[in-house]
Amino acid sequence: MKKVFQISLALLCLSFIATSCKPKQSAYKSVYEAAKEREMQQAETESQTVTKPAGTLAPVEVSVRKEKVTPVYNSDAAGLKSFNVVIASLSVKLNAESLKTRMENEGYGVILAQNEQGMYRVIVASYDDKNSAVAKRNEIYEKYSAKGDIDFLRRTYGVPFNDLWILQREY
C-alpha cells in the first residue's frame, strides 16, 4: 500500500512538472495580437483626410502618425524635419539600410529614423509643413499607380507602397 502511494505521488509530481514548465505560446500570441490591434486602432484614430488642390484627383485618405523618432545616422539629423513621408517600417536595421540604398539609387534622399519601440522608419522626404509632405506622398503614389503597377514595387523592394504614410515627428 505504501509503495502504491509513493508511485502515485511520484507520477502526480511528474505530471505537474511536465505540464507547468511548458511555455504558453497562446499567451505570447494573445499579447502580440493585442499590441498589433492597439497599433492599428491608433493609426485609424490619427488618420486624417487631406484634400488635394482643385483640378487633381479626389481627396485621398492620408495616414498621419505622431512619433518620437531619432535619426539613425548623424548625417541625417539635419534633414529630419517635422513631417516625413515614410515608405517602410522595418524591424531589422540591415533591411532598412538595404532599402535605403535601393531608394537612393532611384533618386530619393532617404533618411533612416528609429522610433522608441526600435522600428526603423525609411523616410524618402522630410518637410517642415504637412501639405508639402502630403503632396510628395501623393506624387510618389501616383508615379507608381499611374503605371498601374503598385505590385511591381512590392516585388522589387518588398514594400507595400500603397500604404505610404506621413510621420509627424514629436520632439
Image (cartoon, rainbow, N blue to C red):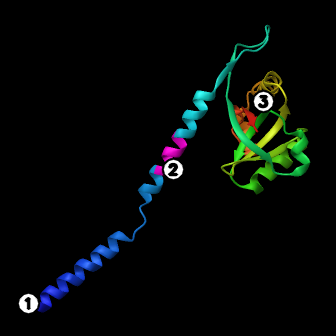
In the image: residue 86, left or right of residue 1: right
Secondary structure category for the residue under label 2: helix
Q: Position of residue 32 (x, y in %)?
A: 51, 50
Which residue does the numbered mark 2 point to in the structure image? 32
Which residue does the numbered mark 3 point to in the structure image? 144
Image quadrant where one finds the C terminus: top right
Secondary structure category for the residue under label 1: loop
CA separation, marks 3 and 1? Answer: 81 Å
The image shows residue 141, relative to residue 119, as above or below, that is above
Q: Where is residue 127 in the image (x, y as percent from the top left)?
A: 85, 30
Q: Which of marks 2 and 3 is in front?
A: 2
User: What type is the residue that disc 1 sits on?
Assistant: Met
> Residue furthest toward the bottom?
3
- What residue is shown at x 72% (from left), y 35% (from top)? 161
Q: Quadrant of residue 136?
A: top right
User: What type is the residue that disc 3 sits on?
Assistant: Tyr
- What residue is shown at x 47% (from left), y 56% (from top)? 28
Callout 1 environment at 10 Å: few (<14), some (14 to 19), or many (20+)? few
User: What type is the residue that disc 2 sits on?
Assistant: Tyr
The image shows residue 140, relative to residue 68, as above or below, that is above
**135 or 57, nearer to the observer:** 135
Image quadrant where one finds the N terminus: bottom left
The image shows residue 49, relative to residue 86, as above or below, that is above
Q: Position of residue 157 (x, y in %)?
A: 76, 44
Q: What residue range appears in magenta? A: 31-37
The image shows residue 34, relative to residue 125, as above or below, that is below
